[in-house]
Image (cartoon, grey):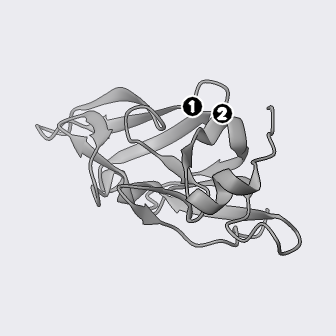
């Protein structure tokens, strides 16, 4: 994945910039019945004058998506993982794929969503990574 260096003027302005162009995907975590599936990125730090100049962002995808009768779609605080299982994520296409309950007689179907296009998962240089104007904490979970 290509990483870019942001200009100080762009960083100071708090610009919305391409997540894929400025951040490095670390991992997607969605195990079992987890109600807090996450994705982690390493991006330029909101404080560009402080070492290490990059920060790790841990994004709770339940804050960005909902399961709408078997179809994952963007919605603030949607908690999609309450009824979706077995999610996978392809970092090169930014597609998340899950098996989701359609809400009738225990029927499930596969659903796909592009996390940056469909949910506006975004990187803002002065805030970090988040969705719907809500930015999430730095400090990724320990690697397993």
Name the residue tied to disc 2.
91
Residue 82 can be seen in this image: yes
Judge whether 120 appears above or below 134 on screen.
Answer: above
Horizontal side, residue 45 vs residue 99: left or right: right
- Counting labels gives 2
As measured in the structure, the alpha-carbon distance from the residue carrying label 1 to the one carrying label 2 is: 5 Å
Query: Decide: marks 1, 2 in contact (CB < 8 A)?
Result: yes
Horizontal side, residue 28 vs residue 71: left or right: right
Rendered image quadrant of residue 99 = top left
Residue sitting at the far front? 9
> Residue at left 45%, top 54%?
61
Horizontal side, residue 10 vs residue 113: left or right: right
Of the pair 53 and 100, the residue shown nearer to us? 53
Of the pair 123 and 34, the residue shown nearer to us? 123
Name the residue tied to disc 1.
94
Horizontal side, residue 84 vs residue 45: left or right: left
Of the pair 36 and 113, the residue shown nearer to us? 113
> Residue at left 79%, top 40%?
4
> Around disc 2, counting alpha carbons within 10 Å, would you say few (fewer than 14), some (14 to 19), or many (20 or more)?
some
* SS label for mark 2: loop
Judge whether 39 appears above or below 36 on screen.
Answer: above
Q: Position of residue 55 (x, y in %)?
A: 74, 65
**Label at residue 12:** none
Q: Position of residue 111 (x, y in %)?
A: 36, 28
> Residue at left 29%, top 38%?
73
Q: Position of residue 27 (x, y in %)?
A: 69, 49
> Residue at left 29%, top 49%?
83
* SS label for mark 1: loop
Judge whether 20 appears above or below 10 on screen.
Answer: above
Residue sitting at the far right? 51
> Around disc 1, counting alpha carbons within 10 Å, would you say few (fewer than 14), some (14 to 19), or many (20 or more)?
some
Residue 30 can be seen in this image: no
């Amino acid at each position: 994945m290509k990483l870019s260096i942001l200009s100080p003027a762009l960083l100071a302005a708090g610009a919305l910039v391409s997540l894929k162009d400025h951040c490095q995907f670390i991992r997607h975590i969605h195990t079992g019945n987890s109600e807090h599936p996450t994705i982690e990125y390493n991006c330029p730090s909101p404080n560009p004058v402080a070492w290490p100049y990059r920060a790790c962002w841990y994004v709770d995808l339940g804050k960005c998506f909902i399961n709408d009768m078997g179809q994952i779609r963007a919605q603030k605080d949607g908690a999609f993982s309450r009824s979706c299982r077995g999610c996978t994520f392809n970092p090169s296409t930014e597609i998340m794929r899950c098996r989701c309950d359609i809400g009738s007689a225990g029927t499930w179907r596969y659903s796909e969503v592009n996390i940056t296009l469909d949910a506006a998962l975004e990187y803002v240089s002065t805030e970090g990574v988040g969705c719907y104007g809500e930015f999430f904490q730095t400090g990724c979970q320990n690697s397993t």
